[in-house]
Amino acid sequence: MLPDPTLSSIDDAAAAAAGGMWSIAIDCLHKLPLDRIDGNDRVLDIALQILVQGDFEDRWQIAKIFPKLGEIAIQPLLNLVNDLDIDIEDRWFGARILGEFDRPQVVAALVDIIQKDREPELTAIAVGALTKIGTGAIVTLTAILATAAPAAQRRMAITVLAQIRHSQTIEPLISVIDDPDPQLRTLIIEALGSFHDPRIPPLLIAKLTDTAASVRKAAVTALSLRSDLAISLNLSQHLRPLLFDLDLAVCEATALGFARLPDPRVVTLLTELLVSDRTPTALKLSAILALGWIGSQSAVDSLVAALVDIDSDLAPEIIVAIGKTELEREYASILLIDYWESKFSATTPSPSIDREIATALGNLGNIASVPTLVKLSADLDDRVRLHAVAAIAKLSPNPLSLNT
């Protein structure tokens, strides 16, 4: 009878491991067919030896073997993770690998680590492992929320549930949506915002008046992603007060969120924000970005009008936003050309404006912009000329002579 080549590979792996030649041992194990790895005690012993004694790369590679071993790998890994006397990196790898096993005892062990361990790196990897297990961990975590568990345990359960993007987490997350910790409320709103469930939008709208700015911002972002509900729920009116929130980050998130809503009224609201003398510069920049993303004719009109009416320091940012318009590219290019011809072609040049206009015209892709770009390519400023030439190269299939 011919020798079993698989058995020989296990022997080779064992011999290599005995000599500390981890990479060879790992290679031998990876070549084994799955049916010879599953439940194989010898493979498990070799894998554990490498996991404890190898360097980081060796451990990373041998970790891929453990899920193939099946149930027999769970208890040794649990022992490894719970051994307080060994190196933290060994425990870290053990916890990470356990995330591959959707078993009640694994979930319980990982929860126990998060509740009791003081090593932040190990706690973080245990949270990640529970998140990877996903639905198998939801029952255990939900049970923690349903009891009078200590605050630290509730925080852990909410944190993990918020990271498991599965519809089974909706109910338990809704049950704690008014948690006293604003950081947890923020996590909950961010998680719920990823689901299209009819129970959620009213809850998000209610959180627009939360006492914590981070929660209000999370609610704004979540609602702005529900463009399908923009009209039926009148989202622009619900969000409008947040443009004037006491927290500037909330205001900025609201302005940017408006760009996602298919409601023509948002252009008016953003324009009013942009031209107001009371609007902080950072918020004006958000309004400029939002109008550029909207890209409708009315949005482009507002941006071009603002070039004349507001602080000239913002003009380059406005031109950049116009140059990124997708919906009305030809229209935007015509207005930019008209603006340049009327304001700068016969007056004192503005190199920063000219550079941005050249780049914007190149991005907008209208071949009719070439004559204006040719004029810009004769500018006295080297950088203006370079931007103009680059834009012409984008627009024209045939090289133009710029020496005439």
Image (spheres, rainbow, N blue to C red):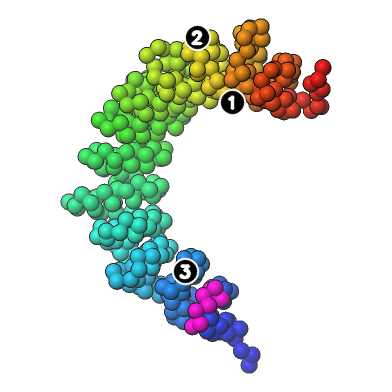
Quickly name the residue at label 1. Answer: 324
In the image, what residue occupies the spot 31% across and 34% down? 215
Q: Identify the amino acid type marked 3.
A: Asp
Q: Which residues are magenta?
A: 18-26
User: With respect to residue 134, does 82 lie above or below?
Assistant: below
Quickly name the residue at label 3. Answer: 55
Q: Identify the amino acid type marked 2.
A: Asp
> Which of the two labelled residues, at mark 2 and mark 3, occupies the earlier sequence position?
3
Per the model, the C-alpha gap separating discs 3 and 1 is: 48 Å
Q: Residues within 10 Å of mark 1 (few under 14, many from 20)?
A: some
Q: Nearer the viewer, residue 199 or 302?
A: 302
> Which of the two labelled residues, at mark 3 and mark 1, occupies the earlier sequence position?
3
Q: Secondary structure at mark 1?
A: loop
Residue 362 can be seen, yes or no: no
* Residue 382 lies in quadrant: top right
Q: Residues within 10 Å of mark 2 (few under 14, many from 20)?
A: few
Residue 116 can be seen, yes or no: yes
The reply to whether dot 2 and dot 3 touch (C-beta < 8 Å) is: no
Residue 125: give x, y in percent of width and height.
37, 57
Quarter of the figure that contains the C terminus = top right
Q: Secondary structure at mark 2?
A: helix
User: With respect to residue 404, does 131 lie above or below?
Assistant: below
Relative to residue 79, is residue 372 drawn left or right? right
